[in-house]
Amino acid sequence: MKGLAIVKESQTINLSLGKNGLESFHKGLPEKRLLDLLKNDSKKLHDLQSELGTVFGPAIGLARKNNWVVTSEDKIFLKNYPSEFSGEKTLKQIGENKIPQSELDLDDLSNILRRPDFITEEIIKIKEVSLSESAKSIKISNSSSAIDVESKVPDVVVARIHPLKDTIDEIREIFVTLGFTEIIGNLTQPTFWNFDALFTPQDHPARELQDTFYLDGLSAKKIGTSEQIRKISESHKKSWRYYWDINEARKMVLRTHTTCVTIKHLAENKPDEARVFSLGRVFRNEKVSYKHLVEFNQIEGIVLGKNSTLRDLMGIQREFYRRIGLTKIKFWPTFFPYTEPSFQTMVYNDKLGKWVELFGMGIFRPEVTKPLGITKPVLAWGGGIERIAMLKYGLDDVREFYNNNLNWLRSAKKCQ
């Protein structure tokens, strides 16, 4: 029978300050602390990093986004000091508990809720159940059977984010909070940007059909400016000493890495400084195994600056791994075609009991940057996301992420 019960649902949301919210309540928002340091005079980048610590990344990211600061060489100058900072009022009101939470400014609250671990929400749900009039009119005889309140009910499976997607979102958030900006590029690329611009010779084995997916019969009509084509071809002819074929550079491929996105961004924008990353799918014509797929996700980024050094790149990598929960890391010298010097990041896998390779990194060779008009050092790094996800979820086979094993998908704990 239906209509025997009346259910009234209500909920109360209690807001409190999280770890980062408490720090900002007592010391001020990261971006305000940064601008306060610049009020009297400009400061060097590394001095600000030392004074602000881990909040420097999100602070400088917001300051640049809102055009509050300008950068010249290795110094940062105050350009505009806002009359108010988004989220500051709400942070103070919650911290001091001066007004009812129902009276908070919703726009200001939504801004501060976007920041990780600033505001903690505790949702208290209440259900009141009472009998309807029809239920009250039912006469229950002594012969009626008792209701078994412990009987099994149907299982309900709640939807959740895929573990791999969860890892991708976490990695994206980490680099954004470190002050990086995401750039996006096409999955299909001319070999000019995928290989030639990265100083990979046209007879390199990686460009063969057994390593790369070519789009049959498709060639790009425009691959770059005449100046870019001329300088890159001259660099190849001078260094590799072979005939550079523009028709080979026009061939279209499924991108084998996301570095083609960042190098094209640098070539087209020629920034004085840059902290950007690209995240997305890449394709390699490889034999599928427990650690290799023909299609996987890659994170790759660059830092461009006058005084950028390999030590800075190693520091960025260490901080990234720390935030994602990997603490046993080391750097191993290696060779990559378009960086010199080059390092391979090694991370210790407790389950396998050995060191495993993750990200590659280095400084772009002059043969890569000079033909594109880039004169400052470019720190570059990149690697597969599936391998990081394997470490986080304790898997020894990358194919598990794509097997649609519902038992594992439903039981896997959320990435922390």
Image (cartoon, helix red, strand yellow):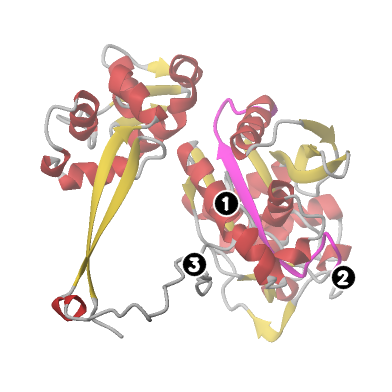
Q: Is residue 384 visible?
A: no
Q: Which mark is residue 353?
A: none
Give the structural element (helix, strand or loop) at label 1.
loop
Which image quarter holds the N terminus?
A: bottom left
Q: Which mark is residue 414?
A: 1
Q: Are marks 3 and 1 in contact (CB under 8 Å)?
A: no
Which image quarter holds the C terminus?
A: top right
Q: Is residue 308 visible?
A: yes
Q: Which residue was labeled with disc 2? A: 287
Query: What residue occupies the far front of the structure in this picture?
Result: 142
Residue at 89% x, 39% y is: 354
Mark 3 vs mark 1: in front? 3
* Residue 305 forms part of the magenta stretch: yes
Give the structural element (helix, strand or loop) at label 3.
loop
Q: Which residue was labeled with disc 3? A: 158
Res 240 quadrant in image: bottom right
Give left or right: position of 90 versus 260.
left
